[in-house]
Image: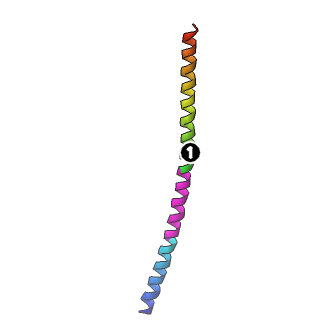
Amino acid sequence: FEASNKRFEAIDKKFEALQKEMIVRFEASDKRFEALEKRLSFLQWFTGIGFAFIATLITLLNLFR
């Protein structure tokens, strides 16, 4: 009974270590995803402003032609 109890404790410790490792990995991937999301948001704004600027230029060029 004592041997099986020790084996169970070892398995339990191994499981806890794996759980902690998974939590750390999930947090890391979460942070990476947030950074990517911010970068994409910036790119979307940049392209939106760029298209608006080009459209304004085309409109002005057509008006003053």
Q: Is 37 within the magenta?
A: no
Q: Over which residues does the magenta segment extend?
A: 18-33
**Residue at the image point whose x is 57% and y is 27% from the top:** 50
Quarter the N terminus occupies:
bottom left
Q: Which residue is mark 1?
A: 38
**Residue at the image point whose x is 56% and y is 35% from the top:** 45
Rendered position, 5 above or below 63: below
Where residue 4 appears, as percent x and y from the top left, is: 42, 88
Quarter the C terminus occupies:
top right
**Colour logic:** rainbow
Where residue 19 appears, as percent x and y from the top left, is: 49, 69
Identify the amino acid type marked 1: Lys
Q: Residues within 10 Å of mark 1 (few under 14, many from 20)?
A: few
Tell me the element at label 1: helix
Where residue 64 appears, as percent x and y from the top left, is: 58, 9
Rendered position, 17 above or below 53: below
**Residue at the image point whose x is 58% and y is 18% from the top:** 57
Q: Decide whether the magenta segment is chiefly helix, strand or loop.
A: helix
Lateral position of residue 53 relative to residue 1, left or right: right
